[in-house]
């Protein structure tokens, strides 16, 4: 009877998470726009780095980030190799709030928007195999820009408007290809010979020879256990969505010209792959010198909290994705009530097939982690945007580069509720990027600083249903007011929920 009740609770949790995931997926797919930047007019818009609640507060540092053997587990879709370290079923949901101040030499304008940031689920299939699926924005477009000019004594207002974006629905898998090496070694004839107290000729080994063989076994097992930490992963993604661009030519003080509107809607629908690798080297002891032991002065002392050196790399090949263009251009005038009255249709084409070339990208990351006490990580990433094309037209973009540094500190993750402040994860980070945009001979840069907190939910960090509320705050700038350009000062807040639970448990009767 007790077994049936436990299973019922797990099934209820499972159903609620699936329903939540479905509703949020539908909501996110209907509203991909999450930016208010005039610079999202170029290429496919602002690119999303797939930062979830934890890494968003650490300067976007995520390439080497992976789970440990203890909760709280998290999802890192930016490097799919991280999925193989999942030990519990994990769900993540997040929202973004953005406030952008657009500034040029003459004026300032503030814009606010909020959007769903991500929704994802991950769980282990085997000790060496993990999987994840979710929905995140791949890119986002959102801008309204006015440009006033006088041509041949005729004033003209150019109004540029864009919206939409591309969504990424992904299914990822990660494997530990060398998992099981220690077990294979312990089943080998070589191990049997080393572990035996007798020689092949059935004579007893001397104590020194037996101890030497035991030291060999210990060294081999340690090496093979270390090799098990190599993870390889990939994301199979479906990219879909639409991007709308329009331009209006308005003649506010002339009755001799009709206004003109030109609009293009690009619809994207295709598959996309990206890959990742991670490795963690564990230091479980340190060397020290014992001056009291003249025979063996160099010894090793076990560490209470193991230290891990983390390495990660990500890669995505240059890919052509299928797209269609709908184009509509017409001249019009506005009647006394302000409604548009079409005069002549200049162009009306639908379903023009073409390709968008997404460039090659790669990145590397390093991290140093001591148990669940502290973590420091750094990333470097590049993307070859100079090869970008859309419908055989180059975008005039440049290669982009990003560096970031972040850290996390937890005073005492095992503290009681009475000392709750010691259980909070304190996070901070910085990042700097050379963007893909070069306008008026100026390549735009972007920089930001971030802080954040992870608030644990639950009384026991070791519980199977341990959860966390993640809050990340970022303050930064992009662009410049020089050369007639626009500078963006932005504030971004990310709120995310991470839910850990234990599914697929095999229960036994007492």
Image (cartoon, rainbow, N blue to C red):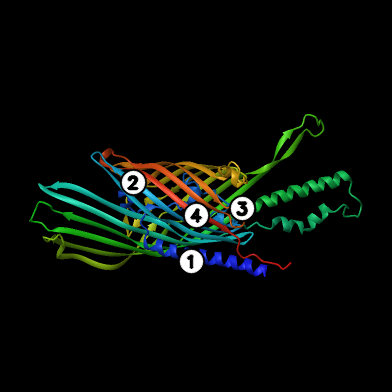
Label 2 crowd (10 A; few <14 / some 14-19 / many >=20): many
Mark 4–mark 3 Cα distance, whole angstroms, equals: 28 Å
Label 1 crowd (10 A; few <14 / some 14-19 / many >=20): few
Q: Along the line of sight, which residue is nearer the eye, 353 or 58?
A: 58
Quadrant of image for the C terminus: bottom right
Sequence-wise, the earlier of marks 4 and 2 is 2
Would you name the residue on which mark 1 appears? 19
Quadrant of image for the N terminus: bottom right
Mark 4–mark 2 Cα distance, whole angstroms, equals: 25 Å
Residue at the limit of the structure toward the right, as seen here: 203
Q: Residue at x 26, y 39 (%)?
A: 483
Query: CB atoms at circles 4 and 2 under 8 Å apart?
Result: no
Dot in front, 1 or 2: 1
Mark 1–mark 3 Cα distance, whole angstroms, equals: 34 Å
Query: CB atoms at circles 2 and 3 under 8 Å apart?
Result: no
Q: Residue at x 67, y 50 (%)?
A: 226
Q: In this view, does 80 lie to the left or right of 195?
A: left
Mark 2–mark 3 Cα distance, whole angstroms, equals: 41 Å
Would you name the residue on which mark 3 appears? 230
Residue 375 seen anywhere in this rendered image of the structure? no
Would you name the residue on which mark 4 appears? 497
Label 4 crowd (10 A; few <14 / some 14-19 / many >=20): many
Dot in front, 1 or 3: 1
Would you name the residue on which mark 2 appears? 100
């Amino acid at each position: 009877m007790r077994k049936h009740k436990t299973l019922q609770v797990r099934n209820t949790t499972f159903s609620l998470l699936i329903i939540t995931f479905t509703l949020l997926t539908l909501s996110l797919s209907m509203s991909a726009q999450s930016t208010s930047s005039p610079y999202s007019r170029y290429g496919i818009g602002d690119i999303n780095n797939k930062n979830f609640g934890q890494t968003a507060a650490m300067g976007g540092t995520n390439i080497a980030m992976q789970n440990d053997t203890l909760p709280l587990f998290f999802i890192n879709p930016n490097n799919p190799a991280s999925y193989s370290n999942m030990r519990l079923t994990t769900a993540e949901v997040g929202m973004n709030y953005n406030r952008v101040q657009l500034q040029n030499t003459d004026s300032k304008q503030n814009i606010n928007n909020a959007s769903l940031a991500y929704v994802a689920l991950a769980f282990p299939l085997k000790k060496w195999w993990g999987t994840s699926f979710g929905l995140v924005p791949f890119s986002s477009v959102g801008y309204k820009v006015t440009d006033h000019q006088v041509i041949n004594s005729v004033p003209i207002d150019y109004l540029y408007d864009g919206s939409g974006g591309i969504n990424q629905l992904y299914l990822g898998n990660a494997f530990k290809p060398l998992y099981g090496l220690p077990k294979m070694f312990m089943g080998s004839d070589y191990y049997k010979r080393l572990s035996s107290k007798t020689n092949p000729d059935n004579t007893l080994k001397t104590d020194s020879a037996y101890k030497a063989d035991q030291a060999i076994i210990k060294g081999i097992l340690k090496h093979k256990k270390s090799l098990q930490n190599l993870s390889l992963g990939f994301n199979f993604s479906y990219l879909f969505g639409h991007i709308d661009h329009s331009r209006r030519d308005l003649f506010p003080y002339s009755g001799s010209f009709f206004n003109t509107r030109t609009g293009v809607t690009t619809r994207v629908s295709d598959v996309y792959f990206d890959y990742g690798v991670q490795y963690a080297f564990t230091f479980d002891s340190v060397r020290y010198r014992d001056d009291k032991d003249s025979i063996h002065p160099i010894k090793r002392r076990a560490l209470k909290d193991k230290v891990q050196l983390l390495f990660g790399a990500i890669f995505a090949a240059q890919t052509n994705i299928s797209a269609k263009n709908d184009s509509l251009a017409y001249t019009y005038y506005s009647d006394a009530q302000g409604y548009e009255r079409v005069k002549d249709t200049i162009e009306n084409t639908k379903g023009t097939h073409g390709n968008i070339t997404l460039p090659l990208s790669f990145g590397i990351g390093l991290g140093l982690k001591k148990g669940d006490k502290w973590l420091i990580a750094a990333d470097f990433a590049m993307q070859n945007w100079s090869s970008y094309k859309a419908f055989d037209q180059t975008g005039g973009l440049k290669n982009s580069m990003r560096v970031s540094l972040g850290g996390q500190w937890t005073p005492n993750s095992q503290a009681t509720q009475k000392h709750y402040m010691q259980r909070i994860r304190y996070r901070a980070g910085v990042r700097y990027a050379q963007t893909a945009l070069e306008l008026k001979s100026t390549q735009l840069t972007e920089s930001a600083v971030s802080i954040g907190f992870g608030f644990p939910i639950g009384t026991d960090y070791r519980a199977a249903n341990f959860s966390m509320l993640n809050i990340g705050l970022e303050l930064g700038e992009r662009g410049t007011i020089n050369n007639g350009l626009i500078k963006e000062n932005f504030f971004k807040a990310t709120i995310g929920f991470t839910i850990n639970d234990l599914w697929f448990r095999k229960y036994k009767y007492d």
